Amino acid sequence: MTPQLDPAIHAPTRLQIVSLLAAAEEAEFAFVRDTLDISDSVLSKHASALETAGYVKIRKGYVGKRPRTWFSLTNLGRQAYRNHVAALQAIIARSGLSVFPQ
Amino acid sequence: MTPQLDPAIHAPTRLQIVSLLAAAEEAEFAFVRDTLDISDSVLSKHASALETAGYVKIRKGYVGKRPRTWFSLTNLGRQAYRNHVAALQAIIARSGLSVFPQ
DNA sequence: CTTTCCACTTTCCATACCGTCAAGTACTTT
DNA sequence: AAAGTACTTGACGGTATGGAAAGTGGAAAG
């Protein structure tokens, strides 16, 4: 069976968050928020949703005396992301598009 | 500026429809419906929405005396699809993956 | 003729989700 | 004590999705 698009990842903002996290071990709340140019509440909610899905781990700590939050993909999240990308590949491949222009 | 995800294309079913149409000159209603395993009403609605966006052309005709509907991507639709895929690629490339299978 | 089919189209719904804005929390700093 | 930091939560409004079911315009059957 072909891989399916993952509804927990597919929404534009989710995809951007997950993809950004997939690139690193861990990322700070503010970094993700600013890189993707989204609001605090949007990031907070999506991160919670991804945590509930088991895809993201939320770590809280301090930098000096200021609270800080870091996100990282869980193994499940990494696998789900790869699977989601595979699903996109399968769909896009059907259209004949390729990275290699003819 | 990097290409943006196209909200008229991004929804899973839309992406599949557009991608399928991108592979051909024209496709029959029943072929698209059966290939994607979606209901008549869902296909009809998405096709109308894509037509409203200017991305799909809906042609009606007859095969014998039976009505039949064909869909095709407009040039605008093809361009929008390419652009959308480029946006996906830009997001996914950040993670080191690609939407184009190698 | 008139009922039934066919090939979609539309409407009705119920759910779900997305993002903004406002308010809340738990400290820390001034 | 008041204000700020770094998020979190709740209330809302608007959109969208899909299933079910009724509707439409012929065509075929009885």
Image (spheres, coloured by chain):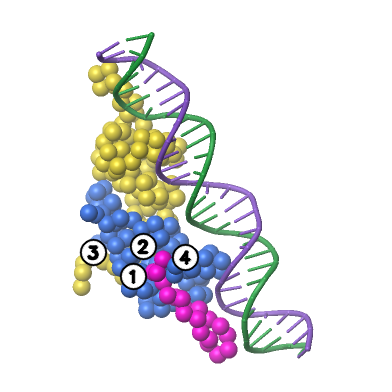
Chain colours: A yellow, B blue, C purple, D green
Image quadrant holding the C terminus of chain B, namely bottom left
**Does the image show residue A79?**
no
Respond whether the residues carrying marks 1 and 3 are from the same subunit: no
Q: Is residue B67 above or below residue C12?
A: below
Respond whether the residues carrying marks 3 and 2 are from the same subunit: yes
- Measure the C-alpha gap from mark 3 to mark 2: 14 Å
10 Å crowding of disc 4: few (<14), some (14-19), many (20+): some
Q: Which residues are magenta?
A: B53-71
Q: Chain of mark 4?
A: B
Image position of A73 (left or right of B36): left
- Please name the amino acid that badge 4 sits on: Ala
Question: Chief secondary structure of the magenta span?
Answer: strand
In magenta stretch: residue B18: no
**Does the image show residue B87?**
yes
Q: Earlier in the sequence, mark 3 or mark 2?
A: 2
Residue where numbered disc 1 is placed: B76
Respond whether the residues carrying marks 2 and 4 are from the same subunit: no
The answer to which image quadrant residue A65 occupies is top left
10 Å crowding of disc 3: few (<14), some (14-19), many (20+): few
Q: Nearer the viewer, residue B63 or B50?
A: B50
Q: Secondary structure at mark 1?
A: helix
Mark nearest the camera among 2 and 4 is 4
- Please name the amino acid that badge 2 sits on: Ala
Residue B5 in picture, x, y percent from top left = 33, 56
Q: Residue at x 56, y 69 (%)?
A: B40
Q: Residue at x 32, y 47 (%)?
A: A16
Residue where numbered disc 3 is placed: A99
Q: Chain of mark 2?
A: A
Image position of C11 (left or right of A40): right
Q: Secondary structure at mark 4?
A: helix
Q: Residue at x 42, y 55 (%)?
A: A5
- Measure the C-alpha gap from mark 4 to mark 3: 29 Å
